[in-house]
Image (cartoon, rainbow, N blue to C red):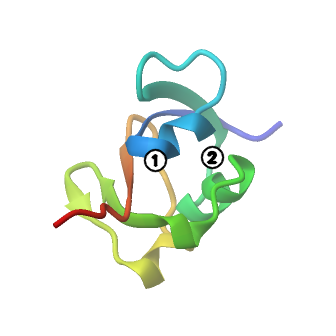
Amino acid sequence: MADKITITLKCFAFLAQYLPEGARGNTVQLELASGTTIGQLLQELTIDPEMVELVILNNGFVDGEARQNQMLKAQDTLALWPEVAGG
């Protein structure tokens, strides 16, 4: 049996619709297999990576290339934002 970790996931704007059941507002606590990457989590939640403009992991920016392979750790907070249109 794989070790499990718990993270906090926050999805903003329309990305909040991809949060699993049990979310409060735009935030949910998730139990994941140890070693899960941001890319794997997006795939599990059926979020197209092209829809995610900004990724913040524990208050630090994660650029596009690193997102796929960045492993999540216990107690991490991951925040996802779509591209914001405006003018």
Picture coordinates of residue 27 (x, y %)? 42, 27
Inspect the image, locate mark 1, and give the three-letter code of the amino acid beneath it: Lys
The residue at the point 68 percent across, 46 percent down is 45
Disc 2 marks a residue whose amino acid type is Ser
Q: Does residue 27 appear in the picture of this structure?
A: yes
Q: Of label 1 and label 2, which has the lower sequence position?
A: 2
- Looking at this view, is 12 or 69 the one in front? 12
Give the residue displayed 63% in from the left and 56% down from the top: 47
Q: Residues within 10 Å of mark 2 (few under 14, many from 20)?
A: some
**Does 60 sit above or below residue 65?**
above
* Residue 59 sits above or below residue 70 on the image: above
Give yes or no for contact between labels 1 and 2 (Cβ–Cβ under 8 Å). no
Query: SS at mark 2?
Result: loop
Which residue is found at the position 73% from the left and 50% from the top? 44
* Residue that protrudes farthest toward the front in the picture: 87
Q: Would you say residue 36 is visible in this rendering?
A: no
Q: Nearer the viewer, residue 32 or 25?
A: 25
* Quarter of the figure with residue 82: bottom left
Which disc, if any, is residue 34?
2
Q: Nearer the viewer, residue 35 or 66?
A: 66
Give the side of residue 6 with respect to residue 27, left or right: right
Could you tell me which quadrant the C terminus lies in?
A: bottom left
Circle 1 is placed at which residue position? 73
Relative placement, left or right, of 52 versus 63 is right
| Neighbours of disc 1 within 10 Å: few (<14), some (14-19), many (20+) | some
